[in-house]
């Protein structure tokens, strides 16, 4: 089980990386064999599933291009078994939650995103 303190530390690193818009800082949080499932990926790429670090990096760069004012504010962090759920608001006030499963190195291996509305 991930402790609440560990989950909060990760959430801080995650939101800091994303709000910096620095792709290298963002991508460091993800495993090489990461798989992401997100309705935003479906909207931007035509496929909601993105697999592999290079494809995920390209997806994130496209997201930062399309949403240049992207900004997140973490509302809640929920720890679980080698996973956490981050509940946050985006720059448009849309609520989102990401369920993140970690590998043994503490990097995101699988992520499923959920939104109260698509942006």
Image: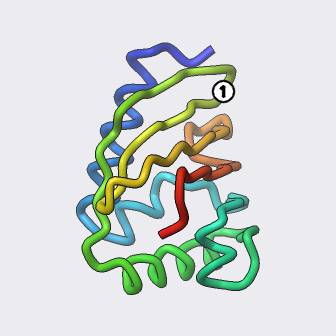
In the displayed structure image, the side of residue 82 where residue 68 appears, left or right? left
Residue found 66% across the figure and 62% down from its top: 38
Q: Residue furthest front?
A: 117
Q: Where is residue 77 in the image (x, y as percent from the top left)?
A: 45, 27
Q: Residue at x 71, y 70 (%)?
A: 50
Residue on which disc 1 sits: 82
Q: Label 1: state its secondary structure.
A: loop
Q: Left of 45 or right of it: where is 7? A: left
> Based on the displayed image, in which of its 4 quarters is residue 1 positioned?
top right
Dot 1, crowdedness within 10 Å: few (<14), some or many (≥20)? some
Image height of 97 relative to 51, above or below: above
Q: Of 52 and 97, which appears nearest the observer? A: 97
Q: Position of residue 84 (x, y in %)?
A: 57, 30
Q: Is residue 86 left or right of residue 25?
A: right
Residue 101 sits above or below residue 64 on the image: above
Residue at point 61% right, 41% down?
A: 100
- Does 39 sit above or below residue 98? below
**In x, y percent, where is residue 9?**
35, 29
Quadrant in the picture for residue 73:
top left
**Residue at point 38%, 71% (across, down):** 23
Task: Where is residue 71? Give x, y as percent.
Answer: 28, 60
Q: Decide which of 108, 77 is in the foreground and name it.
A: 77
């Amino acid at each position: 089980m991930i402790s609440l303190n560990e989950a909060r530390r990760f959430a801080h690193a995650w939101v800091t990386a994303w709000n910096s818009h620095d792709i290298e800082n963002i991508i460091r949080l993800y495993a090489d064999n990461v798989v992401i499932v997100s309705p935003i990926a479906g909207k931007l790429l035509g496929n909601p599933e993105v697999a592999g670090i290079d494809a995920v990096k390209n997806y994130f760069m496209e997201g930062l291009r399309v949403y240049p004012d992207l900004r997140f504010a973490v509302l809640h962090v929920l720890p679980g078994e080698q996973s956490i759920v981050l509940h946050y608001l985006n720059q448009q006030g849309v609520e989102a939650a990401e369920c993140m499963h970690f590998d043994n190195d503490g990097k995101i291996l699988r992520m499923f995103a959920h939104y109260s509305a698509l942006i």
